[in-house]
Image (spheres, grey):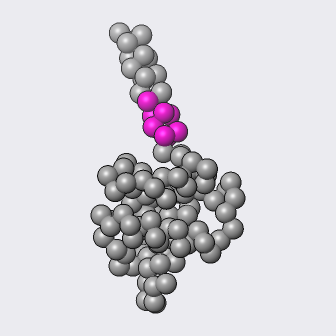
Amino acid sequence: MFYGGALLAATSVSAYCIDVLAQQLVSPPDTYMSDLISAPADDDFWIYVMGLSSGANAAWIATTGEPLFCHPHPATDVEQTRHVILRFLATIDINETTILEAVVPGAFAAAYPCGGPAF
């Protein structure tokens, strides 16, 4: 009985650790630029991108009480999402630390500022 309980606990801890690692994705430009430029609208890449934007906005609201960005385009408009991110990337220096997980929230914050004009 004890052995089974210990095995179950170890399995649960292992699954939790794998889940935590999976949530710590870091995507440098060499892994996302080709998808950003050419991924079709039905590609899973866009689901991840929209998850990054909505997750960042939700986290910002939870932390500060204010949204990071306001009134973005519809999540289904892949071409507008592509445009927003590429336009943002054109304004910054891109290197190996320009990870997608920071670029997407920055791009949406720049394109859809709260209380101000969008670029």
In the image, is residue 41 above or below residue 12?
A: below
Q: Please say whether residue 62 is visible from this viewpoint.
A: no
Q: Position of residue 90 (x, y in %)?
A: 60, 72
**Left/right of residue 83 with respect to residue 28 in the rendered view:** left
Q: Please say whether residue 24 is visible from this viewpoint.
A: yes
Q: Quadrant of residue 58?
A: bottom left
Identified at 62% across, 75% down, the residue is 91
Q: Position of residue 16 (x, y in %)?
A: 45, 34
Q: Which residues are magenta?
A: 15-22
Identified at 42% across, 10% down, the residue is 3
Main secondary-structure element of the magenta-colored stretch: helix
In the image, is residue 31 above or below residue 60?
A: above
Identified at 39% across, 70% down, the residue is 80
Q: Is residue 18 magenta?
A: yes
Identified at 49% across, 58% down, the residue is 36
Depth check: 9 or 77 in front? 77
Q: Position of residue 42 (x, y in %)?
A: 32, 52
Depth check: 36 or 11 in front? 36
